[in-house]
Amino acid sequence: MDSGNSPANSGLRKTALNALHKRLGAKMVNFGGWDMPVEYPCSGGLMCEHRAARGGVGVFDVSHMGDIRIHGAKKPGGALAAVQQLTMNDASKLAIGQAQYSAMLYPNGTFVDDVIVHRLGEDDYLLVINAGTREKDISWVRENTKGMDCVVEDLSDAYTQLAIQGPRAVDVLQRLTDAKLETIKNYWFTHGTVCGLANTLIARTGYTGEDGFEIYVPSDVTTSERVWNEVFAAGKEFGILACGLGARNTLRLESKMALYEHEISDKINVWEAGLDRYCHLEKGEFIGRDALVKSKDEGLKRALVGLEMVERGIARDGYRCLDESGNEIGVVTSGSPSPTLGKNIALAYVPPSMTGLGTAVFVEIRGQKCKAQVVATPFYKRVRTPRAQPGMAVPR
Amino acid sequence: MAYPTQFKYSKDHEWIEVKGDVATVGITDYAQGELGDVVFVELPKVGTKVATGKTFGSVESVKAVSEIYAPASGEVVEANGALVQKPEAINTDPHTAGWLIKIKLANAAELGTLMDAAAYEAYIAEKKKEASA
């Protein structure tokens, strides 16, 4: 069935909510071949959307992301074996209902993509992958599980995926589901009835650094629009706003979350990206392991750091990093004003010798050397309030 | 927002208003809308020579940098310093308080190639049609 989402179609790909975004007057942008909302004037624009996600609740259409299901065929454990071979984190540690941040690597230890692995069942996994790498990832998974005892399904077009993010996200979603959201911990998920849709995946995941949920509903336009509208009706009293990719980027940058082709790519390895804690060499063989062991012995040639501009200027993606003398020593992977901090921040690759906090790093901005300094990351960390116990007052 | 008839307009969405041999330059309402909330402005120092079609500074939103092209040649006699603290004036008042620079024109005849308000409105109407196609 041609849903119009194959790259063979001329023009940009569209999510089921594309018409709705345009009716809302969203400013649209081409993101990885997808016609996506970057900001909504009706929300007040990027700054308002960012603040809603940090302080209240915001909703993102992230249906452009992909979904690959790997489940066991004949013998039990075939799917786990495939996931363990394909990814760097240890999926054997996952309970049913649990998810983990991970990545698929090339044999040289660089990134095919980052991914969230969800354990759906006994031998049943869902990999949620990036929009821009959908085809590459599905080919990679199929190619590298050939002859393995598992079934690979591309479910990318099956779901409209909404990310409901912010401290009030749980309040909004609870109105729409029978699932007991307070029992779902961060990076865990469940299936429940959402907006009358049975067996809907509800995951406590997101790309903002705030509490929040991602729900996966059927991708037909009628259902997708109905769910979006019900989420907004439920969220009205919490000041819910539609949020686009502009705010999505500033939120994830403040929380130091990687973006493919920026902090991670097929030219950057796991150690350089600072993602050691998601890489479990001790779990056994996986694609890229040998190269990672070797490069660990050889030592880092560059490392990812957080920068804060000291002199007036905004460091942006791709700008060169220079030393005091003007020699090129690295590159900005992502840079932007930070709405929460009121400062101009960036992530950049610099030599290991320049990773100390407070080190001066210069960014070349339209031919001028502009001073920045290395700062700790994440730039922003949400305050985690304790989960409410009966009889306990929880500060809002 | 109406486009003042006493302004001339460039294809890069700058406006210029001439009073004697000094001209004020800014970006249009269309340009500020495309850019989003302005957070940062880079303007040239007094005395800088600007040349038609060449960049003289930049206006930045959170997500984008927009270089500003001189609609006419001349020498900068004033830059709008208030924009350092209040860059948002470019969004709220792009044709008035959000002005960028004043220049002493080198050659007033250059303005002949710019659009008047009606032509500019037609130009952006066409752009909006292309965008929603």
Image (tube, grey):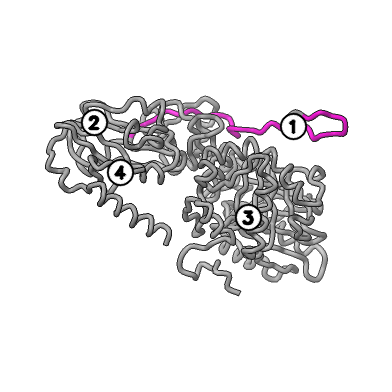
Label 2: element kind: strand
Location of residue A332 in the rendering, given as x and y in whole percent from the top left corner: 46, 40
Residue topped by disc 3: A104
**Structural crowding at the residue carrying mark 2, measured as other residues with C-alpha within 10 Å and reported as few (<14), some (14–19) or many (≥20):** many
Q: Chain of mark 1?
A: A
Residue topped by disc 1: A385
**Structural crowding at the residue carrying mark 3, measured as other residues with C-alpha within 10 Å and reported as few (<14), some (14–19) or many (≥20):** many
Residue topped by disc 2: B102
Three-letter amino acid code at the position of disc 2 = Lys
Q: Chain of mark 3?
A: A
Q: Which of the numbered marks, if any, corresponds to residue A277?
A: none
Considering only vertical position in the picture, is B9 above or below A22?
Answer: above
C-alpha span from label 2 to label 4: 19 Å
C-alpha span from label 1 to label 3: 33 Å
Q: Is residue B129 visible?
A: yes
The image shows a total of numbered marks equal to 4
